[in-house]
Image: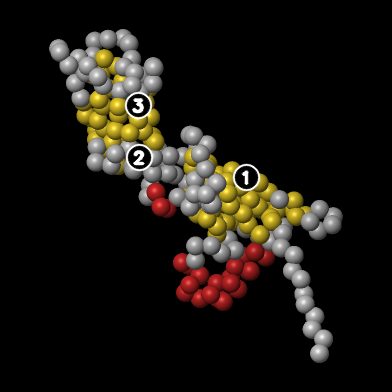
Amino acid sequence: MNQQWEITRRQLAAAGRVIDARTGKALQGATVTITAMPVVFQKKLALKALQYGAQWGGMLERLDRRRSRLDGSFYFMDLPDGDYQLSAMLPSMGRRYGTAEAAVSVTRDNTGRVKVAFVDLALQPTVVEGKITGAGQKGAVAMAQVRVKGSGERSFSDAKGHYALSGVEPGERSIQAFAQGYRPAVQKVSVKAAGGSGTLNFSLTKANS
């Protein structure tokens, strides 16, 4: 009995990386989802949803959903031609990062080969930043340690006194500042949204004053 085997050649359609918008560092474990798509792909997803039933919603990876690898990369295979909207988020980090969106178009050349759409999705971290100065002084305080009380994120001020705490959970946060020769200080700042930013400046008092 003769058996015929059908060979299916899969084609890469859309790919890219998920990165930190401030540092450019690759982000692993981000969820990249296709949120808008051609009708033909919508129908394909509907059939898959019926096939998998209750498991479909909880699947970490599926036709319209991928997770970024160690190097931040992700990819989608065998997408029909058309316009797509991609959305990325990093659920493992709570609300320490915002979301990112990008539009891609999938097309084929006259031989039927897909022209791969590449895109980087840059997630904006939630940030608290500001400047450290000495009370009654015009100069900046360099190498002051600044940290979030209770959660441990920390940073150091640069030569101009600027600091940035990146990847902070939104809400009201108590920020501590320490510098050699100065009294420790603590202030509160509120950052309302994931991926948002707050500004908090410190004027440190000399320890012997």
Q: Please name the residue that numbered disc 1 is placed on.
A: 119
Q: Position of residue 177 (x, y in %)?
A: 26, 27
Identified by mark 3, the residue type is Phe
The reply to whether callout 3 and callout 1 are in contact (CB within 8 Å) is no
Dot 1: few (<14), some (14–19), or many (≥20) neighbours within 10 Å? some
Quadrant for the C terminus in the image: top left
The reply to whether callout 1 and callout 2 are in contact (CB within 8 Å) is no
Between the residue at mark 3 and the residue at mark 1, the CA separation in whole angstroms equals: 33 Å
- Quick one: 197 or 139, which is closer to the camera? 139
First along the sequence among labels 3 and 1: 1
Q: Secondary structure at mark 3?
A: strand
Image quadrant in which you'd find residue 40: bottom right
Which numbered disc covers residue 168? 2
Q: Please name the residue that numbered disc 3 is placed on.
A: 156
Dot 2: few (<14), some (14–19), or many (≥20) neighbours within 10 Å? many
Q: Position of residue 134 (x, y in %)?
A: 26, 14
| Residue drawn at 57 percent across, 56 percent down | 34
